[in-house]
Amino acid sequence: MRHAAARSNLLVPEVREVMDIRQASDYLGISPDTLYKYASEGFVPAFKLGNRWRFKRSRLDEWMDRQSDQQAAEAELDPHQKKPVRPAL
């Protein structure tokens, strides 16, 4: 039973507070190349440690919340925006 628990932990990637570009891209569900572009443009919160991008999970969560709130507010202001896709039943 102990081995099964240890093995199941290997299948779940560890989410750390400070992530590299690969870990953060997995967390956000986008490619590392796209995340690198977004970080370089200042679109996502990131910082450089040496010459490598790093991402704080808590800052990414806050950023996603703001993005979500902003898009919801814009949808309320623009009645001509496309209707959302109906959820699958």
Image (cartoon, rainbow, N blue to C red):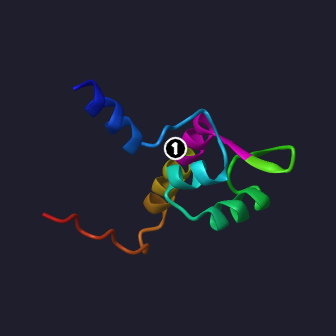
* Residue 61: image location, x then y, percent: 54, 40
Q: Residue at x 45, y 62 (%)?
A: 75
Magenta region includes residue 2:
no
Please, what secondary structure does the residue beneath circle 1 have?
helix
Q: Residue at x 23, y 68 (%)?
A: 86
Q: Name the image quarter holding residue 8.
A: top left
Residue that lies at the very extreme toward the top in this rendered image: 2
In front of the other: 12 or 18: 12
Magenta region includes residue 63:
yes
Q: Majority secondary structure of the magenta segment?
A: helix
Which quarter of the rendering shows the N terminus?
A: top left
As shown in the figure, which amino acid type bears the numbered disc 1?
A: Asp
Looking at the image, residue 12 sits to the left or right of residue 87; the answer is: right
* Residue 69: image location, x then y, percent: 50, 48
Residue 4, compared with residue 86, is above or below; it is above
Q: Name the image quarter holding residue 82.
A: bottom left
Q: Which residue is drawn at 60% across and 45% down?
A: 63
Q: What stretch is highlighted in magenta?
A: 54-64
Residue 57, compared with residue 69, is above or below; it is above
In front of the other: 52 or 5: 5
Q: Which residue is drawn at 49% across and 58% down?
A: 29
